[in-house]
Amino acid sequence: MTAFELVEPSSLGEALGLLDPDDPAVRPIAGGTALILMIKTGLYQPRRLVSLRALGPALTKISAAADGGLIIGAMVRLTQTERSVLVREVAPVVADALLTHSNIRVRNVATVGGNLAHGDPHMDLPPLLIALGASVRAAGPGGERDIPVEELITGYMATVLGNDELIVALHIPPQTGRRTAYAKITARTADDWPALGIAASIGAAEVRIAIGAATEIPMRLKQTEALLAGRRIDDALLREAGRCAAAEAPVIGDQHGSAAYKRVLVEVHLRRALQKALAL
Amino acid sequence: MSDSRPISSGQIGRSLPRVEARAKVTGRAEYIHNLRLPGMLWAKIARSTVPHGRIRHIDTSTAQATPGVHAVITGEDILRVIPDPYFGPAFHDQPILALGKIRFAGEPVAVVLAEDPRIAEAAAQEVSIDYEELPAVLDEVEALTATTFVHDALKPAGMFADLKHLAGKRDTNVALDYHLRRGDVDRAFAEADHVFEHVFRTPQQMHTPLEPHCAIAEATPAGVTVHSSTQTPSSVRVEIARLLGLPENRVRVRTAFLGGGFGAKVYVKIEALAVALSLLARRPVKIALTMEEQFFTISKHGSTFRIKSAVTKDGRITARRCEVIYNGGAYADIGPRVAQKSGFSAAGPYDIANVSIDSCETYTNRPTAGALRGFGIPQLVWAYESHTDLIARELGLDPVEFRRRNLLKDGLPQATGTMLEDTATVAVLDRLVQRIGWGQPFDRGTGTLRRGRGVAIGLKASISPTTSVATIAVAADGSATLYCGTVDMGQGSTTALAQIAAEALGIAAEAVRVVTPDTDVTPYDMGTLGSRSTFHMGHAVRRAAEEVNAKLAAMAAETGLPDGSNLPIAELFRRKYGMQAGTIVGSGSFVPDYAPPDQATGLTPNATPYWMMGGSGAEVEIDTETGQVRVLRLINVADAGTPINPRIVETQLTGAAIMQLGFTLSEEMVFADGQLCNPSLADYKIPGIRDMPEVLAGETVAARQKSGPYGAKGVGETGTFGVSPAIANAIHDAVGVRLTELPITAEAVYRALRRAKGDPLPEE
Amino acid sequence: MRGMVSVAPRTIRFTLNGVAAECVVAPHETLVEVLRDRFALGGARESCGQGLCGCCTVLVDSLAVSGCLYLAVFADGAELVTVEGLADGDALHPVQEAFIEAGAFQCGFCTPGFVLMTTRLLADYPDPGDDQIRHYLSGNLCRCGAYPQIIEAVKLAARKLRAG
């Protein structure tokens, strides 16, 4: 790495003031596991990094939301999340998914907010959080706004966040009555980025299906959701849903597998994820 | 040598922990990786971005102007200090930095020197190279008939006498072809009951030692010192001395422990560049490759192997034709030896009267391929043991029974004509069959999960001609120091050689200190490669110890002690020198017998000082809906002769098997238009702990290599032989499909399943 | 050239293997570089450079991190432990003893990372099963393939630690 400036503001307001809406060479840094990798490999050269590590306890806490859901501060580490009693209570599927998300050293440093703001399509949290109906709260010079995770990521490592906007918290709504399963499928070795991440969340009246990694951005599979909505899910419907998802998902081929093969993975693993959710 | 052999001190067969164990668990073991010298500059390499082309112009001005940059060096600058800057162990074909021509994408073109490696790295990105692109040849089969030539003419080195005839050969991409002709193959095929023919392929793969290559050169008027993570300090010294026109004694090459080697660090890799840079900069220069750069430095040969067998109704193989084409990449490195040595046993551990082998090393516009744990043998076993299983299935024979009917045994000639001796082919197969539970009922799975079992065995010739020399010094207090050039890259040679020295001296292994290789003090050894150290260096060490014993006996006689006196050595020195003073030095060398193969027939009565024999048995579970392969059990059995250190031998076997498991299931250097797409551990996936089979065993059979030191033979590569075909055979057993290319990814298995159903998955 | 930016090195203070330490670092220096260049500690070593192999493992406030992806300035005020800090004088840490007794390494380059990770594994799970061991150590690569012996060493270390 070559030289850059690092500033360490002690309040959110100060941090926002140090960001620059027009200069992509100024970026916030949270845990930095992904960002430093990009800098080391020459994909990104910052002029200034704004550290979010000292912005106060509000960003590093997991708390119960007023609606019975969860508020996870943006600077909460992934291991802190997976070990949280509250997370285990409200959304155990999140805690489980994090266990194979990345290695423990990365999870010890990477933060929930950083993970989502990074916009990497090969991450486990976005499709899972989409299926859970989660949203992030972003702060910017004009104040705060809530963004559904479903609308957060717009392209390869691209989000709706402005250069001068920060994620401050993740909100997971109460999951009462919902059964959710997530599957991370690796195609090469056991510890790898996923070839496919797929989440199935079954509610009383509707089903939410979201996929990541196999597609350019994480997304819901709405035709498949419509197929399943309000119906008793039997073996025949499971198979039909698998086929529907495989046809619907705009998968792309890469080193993890061809597009044709990823459609097979979608078909099989959506069915299995639904079965797993039903068994909860 | 002396006949006054001391009584065994029980050092052989002792599972002594590695002598350097404490240093390794405390993080204090020395690696060249951690070495820094005062005044040292860091070198970072600018690499080519095209696979084949002529260099029109190199613009170094921006890099040169970067604050903190000491100098930017190109191939033309190297000529000022090394006028003929081409190196290589088999061919002098590789320029220290590209000169005029680019032969693969990623080839070193220029170097930036700076005190801060980060500045050097950033400035190296600013070197701009203008090319005239040439058509590239990438595939080994196409290389044979291509009209694009990677090199204008062949330039064999003098080191190997049997390559000399290739000098000056033009318009070819064939660096070496080895031919073996035994019996009358054509006739046997014409008369055969059955003929089977298959083609198997392996991709280019990489060693990925966790300590990437590194070297520091210090050039002074008195000579050159190179600190390097090399497996072959003596051979590096010889080559650097040749390049500089210096006598060997003006070149010092020293190593430390190596963070893995696996063949990646044999012969000159970055040492010549480090030396040239130090000569130009007049300062010590360090090159420490990144993991990514290792992929552009050396690799394992991709291969295409067409194999054809004639078989009788009752399952005897009467003839075999082997056409092996290795993809050697842009420079020969040790590839020609890989093609020849592996060619000896391309027909497998079988007794076949009529054999034809063509084993060929090609040049292509890819990163160079060289030695990787098995010297070509794993690529060959992959093919011939997959082929063996296919024949057995076609004939309705049990695959193990089919192997037994054709197995080579002691006293029978191997394809080269060299007799098999002290090679436990039968015991290895027997034990494998027993451990995997062959022929016994087992849970074959239900529904979408199906299980199967497979076995595979392989045979390898050792290295010859080759030389090892060792010396042992005994101090006046009786303590012994072993000086030898064998490099400990994790295989445990320091411990095993200490045990051999100790056994011969009649003392405990813990009392022997082994000096880290340093050509200023450790005598010549060809290199730590090809599983040769235990046998070759083991003999040299034993002989050095025997000379010490003889000198001690002479000293005892000289000081008036009766024959067979057991006076402590320290007391003996005091009697001779009147105080604690003096040294006794014994030296020993070992050069195995060898007869080079006949130029026309490839036959030789003495291809190898010993044969290595190993096999694997696998039990796998396949998810038929996705093709996902789980290896449940992987049993690896080897003939290691009499193991010097059984525990270390076991870990060598399981470690080799895990490495080969990666080459089987996940590892592949992926190219697009000649550009390597995945030069990092993020995208080139080596096995982690969760990829390990639930049961992974490595064991040796009771055996003795009579010609070996204390009955031992080499074992570092043996655990790799059978893994890939055992897994492919087990997959066939489980789900009835045959994979003919590595790696066996889930997608490859799934596609094979769909093809078998007559409903192939579209290619997209 | 870029405009004026403050990239000034700064002094950071921390505890290193139980001893107070300080040094001047620039923002772009990583922890593994600083430990090596300023403190001559080579036990944490960069290999893959991507946080995947674990060779550069350092404990920061008892959390294992990849030193190659961790900015040194972030260690300001932290307690750092490297493999060199595990032994108590000549007495090895029980995990180190177990790695020797089980023969759980070959070349040794990855060993400091595995040893440090194992100390944290056993702090979290004093009596780990195979599955817990495999998951916890899945981010450490051993190219020599000493995994079977590493699992054995972890179990042996667990017994040693439980026995006190």
Image (cartoon, helix red, strand yellow):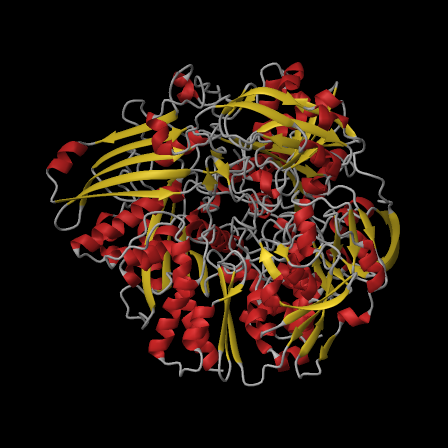
The image shows residue A148 at horizontal and vertical percentages of: 62, 69
Q: Nearer the viewer, residue C163 or B213?
A: B213
Left or right placement of residue B303 versus residue C87 in this view: left
Would residue B15 be found to the left or right of residue B401 on screen?
right
Tell me if residue B640 can be seen: no
The quarter of the picture where residue B230 lies is top right
Q: Position of residue A237 (x, y in %)?
A: 36, 76
The number of discs equals 0
Q: Is residue A65 visible?
A: yes
Q: Nearer the viewer, residue B495 or A10?
A: A10
Residue farthest to the front, as pictured: A142
User: At which x and y percent is residue B282?
Assistant: 76, 22
From the viewer's side, name the closer residue of B97 and A98: A98
In the picture, measured across the screen, residue B42 lies left or right of residue B156, that is right
Q: Residue B186: image x %, image y %?
A: 16, 32
> Vertical placement of B557 versus B566: above or below?
above
- Name the residue located 61 percent from the left edge and 23 percent from the top edge: B240
Taking depth in this image into account, of B282 and B704 the one nearest to the observer is: B282
Which residue is painted at 61% across and 73% down in the image?
A95
Relative to B142, say whether B380 is above or below. below
Residue C126: quadrant of the picture = bottom right
x 43%, y 53%: residue: A257
The picture quadrant where one finds residue B751 is bottom left
